[in-house]
C-alpha cells in the first residue's frame, strides 16, 4: 500500500465560466383583489388612490392591503394629487423583450399627499443625450401624472411628464 496521496486529474477541470441560456415565456392570470382593482379603476377615471397605514398614518401609493412596516391591514382610501417629486429614476438604453424600444425612462414619484413613491414611465424628455436626460430627471424635480384618453384599467393608463413642461 502506497503512502502517496491520491492525485486528481485536472484534464476535465473547468477553467472558463460556463453558461446555460434559458428563456421563459409564461402567461399569468392574477386575481387582483379589492385593493389593486380599486386602484386600477381609479386610473381609468384619472384618479390616484392610496390606502392609509393606521399605525403610522402614512398614505401608501400604490395602495397596499397591509402595512409594509408592521403588516396590519390598511384602512381608509385616500385620493392623492397628480403632481409630485421624482425620488429615483433610470434611463434604459438597451432593449428588453416586451418593453418599449429604448431609450425610455422610468421614475418613482412621491405624489402630493402620498408617503410612498409610484413608478411609471416618463414621457416628453429627450433621452438621446444621457447627460441632459439625467439633469432633466434629477431627484427632486416635480413631475405630473398624465392619463390616457382611452383607459384600459391597467398601469398603462398613466405616465409622468415634467411638471414645468421642460425637457
Image: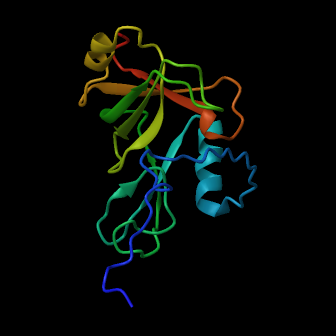
Q: Is residue 37 above or below residue 73?
A: above
Q: Position of residue 141 (x, y in %)?
A: 27, 25
Determine if residue 45 is in view: no
Outermost residue toward the front in this view: 1
Instruction: Report whether residue 167 is seen.
Output: yes
Q: How is the image coloured?
A: rainbow
Q: Residue at x 29, y 67 (%)?
A: 56
Q: Residue 10, image x and y in percent? A: 43, 58
Q: Quadrant of the C terminus?
A: top left
Residue at the spot 41% in from the left edge and 8% down from the top edge: 128
133, above or below 22, in the image: above
Q: Is residue 25 above or below residue 105?
A: below
Furthest residue to the bottom? Answer: 1
Which quarter of the picture shows residue 157? top right
**Which is nearer the eye, 94 or 13?**
13
Tally of numbered tags: 0
The x, y position of residue 158, in whole percent, is 56, 31
At which x and y percent is residue 22?
65, 46
Q: Residue at x 44, y 44 (%)?
A: 16
Determine which quarter of the picture holds residue 72. Answer: bottom left
Instruction: Describe residue 99's horizontal placement relative to residue 163 as left or right.
Output: right
Quadrant placement of the N terminus: bottom left
Amino acid at each position: 500500500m502506497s503512502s502517496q496521496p491520491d492525485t486528481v486529474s485536472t484534464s476535465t477541470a473547468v477553467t472558463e465560466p460556463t453558461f446555460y441560456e434559458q428563456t421563459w415565456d409564461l402567461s399569468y392570470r392574477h386575481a387582483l383583489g379589492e385593493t389593486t382593482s380599486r386602484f386600477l379603476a381609479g386610473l381609468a377615471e384619472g384618479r390616484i388612490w392610496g390606502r392609509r397605514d393606521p399605525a403610522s398614518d402614512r398614505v401608501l401609493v400604490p395602495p397596499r392591503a397591509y402595512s409594509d412596516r408592521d403588516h396590519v391591514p390598511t384602512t381608509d382610501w385616500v385620493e392623492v394629487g397628480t403632481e409630485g417629486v421624482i425620488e429615483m429614476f433610470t434611463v434604459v438604453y438597451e432593449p428588453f423583450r416586451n418593453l418599449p424600444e429604448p431609450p425610455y425612462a422610468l421614475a418613482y414619484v412621491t405624489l402630493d399627499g402620498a408617503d410612498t413613491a409610484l413608478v411609471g414611465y416618463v414621457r416628453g424628455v429627450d433621452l438621446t443625450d444621457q447627460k441632459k436626460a439625467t439633469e432633466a430627471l434629477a431627484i427632486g424635480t416635480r413631475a405630473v401624472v398624465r392619463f390616457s384618453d382611452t383607459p384600459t384599467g391597467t398601469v398603462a393608463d398613466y405616465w409622468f411628464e415634467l411638471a414645468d413642461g421642460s425637457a
